[in-house]
Amino acid sequence: MDGLNQNFQSRVVIDTLTQDWHSSPSSGVRRIYLERDNYSEFAKASSIVEYEADSSFQSHTHENGEEFLVLSGTFSDENGDYPSGTYVRNPHGSSHSPFSKTGCKILVKLRQFDKNDKSRIVIREDDYKWLPGICQGLTVMPLHSYQSEHSALVKWEPHTKFSNHSHWGGEEIYILRGTLFDEFGVYKKGTWIRSPHMSSHNPYTTNDGALIFVKTGHIHE
């Protein structure tokens, strides 16, 4: 099968802190591949992207959209600055010329929007409004919802247990802080997990709790 991690019926776990970096067409910008349907610059892809200080990427248009979360540093474009913790959705047909003055790292998903999902979203840490989760020890910051797809930040207090549940439309997790556990493994900061449609697990935390970025309902293959 062409590309990387294109069997969406299989579970994928990647420790991004141990992966090799791949160069990009722009000097000072490199990537860790998580999933991509080909290796061109026009791939449907999810990646960790790192910008060195005073680096930039060529102006480009977002066919089928761009979604990213700033993991560290400050990411910028002609529309503004996006410090660590900022979540952005640039819809189909939008364009920008990104750069970073200080250096940054982002989790980015390209060409994965429904074309009818046309809203541009920018949520900075100052905008966060945490809501109670569905079990004790969880708080949720909703980021985006469209049809079956939902994105959020979820804060897990230490020693929190979530009941067994199934993932309709799959689940994708990136560990931002702390450690998450389930019956399949241990997931430290920097781990990316993609679980298929109708998979299930029993997640929990121990002493350090966790902060995660989570997407559900977007994996149907």
Image (cartoon, rainbow, N blue to C red):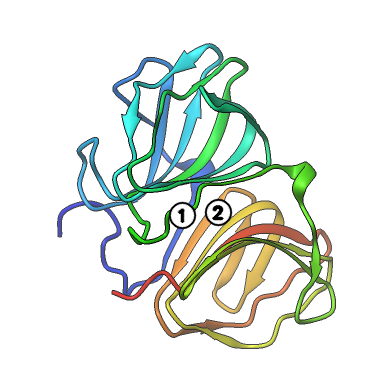
Q: Could you tell me if the residues under marks 1 and 2 are in contact, i.e. CB atoms within 8 Å?
A: yes
Q: Amino acid at mark 1?
A: Ile
Left or right: 11 with respect to 183? left
Determine the image quadrant of residue 206.
bottom right
Quickly name the residue at label 2.
Answer: 191
The location of residue 4, given as percent across then percent down, is 27, 53
Residue most toward the left? 1
Dot 2 lies on which element?
Answer: strand
Q: Is residue 50 above or below residue 150?
A: above
Task: Please state if 64 lies on the left or on the right of 160 as rendered.
Answer: left
Residue at disc 1, secondary structure: strand
Image coordinates of residue 39 in percent, x first then y, are: 21, 41
**Quick check: 145 above or below 2?**
below
Where does the N terminus fall, quadrant-wise? bottom left
Distance between mark 1 and mark 2 Cα atoms: 6 Å
Q: Which residue is mark 1?
A: 14
- The residue drawn where x is 43% and y is 54% is 118
